[in-house]
Amino acid sequence: MQMRPCWVEIRTSFLEDNYRFLQSLAAPDAELLAVVKADGYGHSLALCAPAVVRAGARWLGVTSVEEGMAARALSPETPVMVMAGVFPGQGTEVAEHNLTAVIWEPSQLDDLEAAARVAGLRAGSLPVHLEIDTGMSRQGASLDGLASLLPRLSQGRPSGLKAS
């Protein structure tokens, strides 16, 4: 079969310049999340993640826990957000690799709280990010669903979770 004549070349210095340009457009106190999901959109997570971190990215965004683990290995100190949430049973890896899971359902909190307890994490040490459905109905808590989630993310909760 004839393949499409495509060529992609990544110059990390250009990626870094592009990130810095976007950062210059943001508010001075804004924390930008560089999305490097899908293996850096097919351009290599191993190239793209360190490049945006060098450029000043304060967060890396990935789709899955597996991608989060790979990003964590490349950038040990940079917060990594698992944007598509976690599947049941992945809380252990989230805790072990210090990932920030996006959550929107009580069952996700149940799994993460259990993993935090097993890992012996102190209260408020496992970050989560609450996503609210803004109308696309893809993921995120509904406005009605917030009532069951918000109290679980409040200060002083005995779990290891903290809201980001």
Image (cartoon, grey):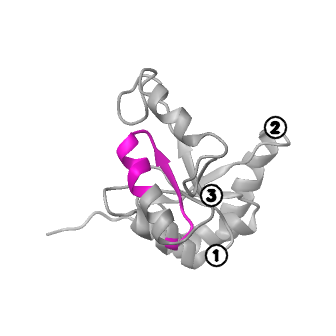
Other residues around mark 3 within 10 Å, as few (<14) / some (14–19) / many (≥20): some
Which residue bears the numbered disc 2? 27
Numbered disc in front, either 2 or 3: 3
- Label 1 with label 2: CB-CB less than 8 Å: no
The residue under label 2 is which amino acid type? Ala
Label at residue 123: 3
For the residues labelled 1 and 3, say whether their Cβ atoms are less than 8 Å apart: no
Amino acid marked by disc 3: Ala
Residue 153 circle label = none
In this rendering, which labeled residue sits more in front, label 1 or label 2?
Answer: 1
| In the image, residue 39 above or below residue 136 | below
Looking at the rendered image, the quarter that the N terminus falls into is bottom left
Give coordinates of residue 122: x percent, y percent: 63, 64
Q: Callout 2: 10 Å neighbours few (<14), some, many (20+)? A: few
Q: Tally the numbered discs.
A: 3
Q: Which mark is residue 76?
A: 1
Residue 11: tell me if it is visible. Answer: no
Query: Which label's residue is closer to the chain start, 2 or 3?
Result: 2
Residue at x 55% of width, y 34% of height:
151
